[in-house]
Image (cartoon, grey):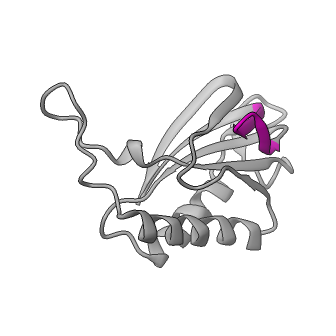
Amino acid sequence: MKAVIQRVSRASVEVDGRTVGAIERGLLVLLGVAKGDDDAAAAKLADKVATYRVFEDDAGKMNLSVRDVGGGVLVISQFTICADCRKGRRPSFDPAAPPDEAERLYAVFVDHLKASGLQVQTGVFGAMMDVHLVNQGPVTFILET
């Protein structure tokens, strides 16, 4: 499982021109589910996202998590980040989990974040989405299980 997390001052996602999820200060998470991922991987990655210290404290150091700052999390399914891009000029999506399993584990990840007390918004799994964000910093990290 792989997550690209971006610290944002705001982010939203639209499907067919309609906003389906939006947050103010927090994290935008692009989540990819790979073959072989399981519930434990989803829970572990959700815990890491919730507690990853990417927000600045009063001293200007990245010492605070999204939970610490009371931020929101916008989670977008993104199978393309699981692509194998090592050969040729076209990505192979073979490493990505099948849609049914990916959707289930995406839901496990989201539910785990919600259970930790975070305000969580989502896109629509499998839909064509327009994602809008203001990356603050910019600060972007890739987390993997």
Residue drawn at x 52%, y 38% as measured from the top left:
141
Q: Which residue is nearer to you in this view: 61 or 33? A: 33
Q: Is residue 76 left or right of residue 33?
A: right
37 left or right of 111 in image: left
* Residue 107 shown left or right of residue 26 in the figure: left
**Quadrant where the C terminus is found in the figure:** bottom left
Q: Nearer the viewer, residue 74 or 135?
A: 74
Q: Position of residue 105 (x, y in %)?
A: 50, 70
Residue at the farthest front position: 16
Residue 84, compared with residue 119, is above or below; it is above
Q: In the figure, residue 107 lies in which quadrant? A: bottom right
- Image point 25% across, 36% down: which residue? 91
Q: Residue at x 73, y 50 (%)?
A: 73
Residue 86, image x, y percentages = 17, 35
Residue 65 visible somewhere in the drawing: no
Q: Is residue 19 magenta?
A: yes
Residue 112 seen from this side: yes
- In the displayed structure, does residue 81 sit left or right of residue 61? left
Magenta region: 9-22
Q: Quadrant of the N terminus?
A: bottom left
Q: Residue furthest bottom?
A: 39
Position of residue 42 measured from the top left corner of the image (x, y, whole percent): 51, 68
Residue 22: percent from left, percent from top: 80, 42
The image shows residue 43, relative to residue 87, as above or below, that is below
Q: Residue shown at 42%/49% (left/top)?
A: 79
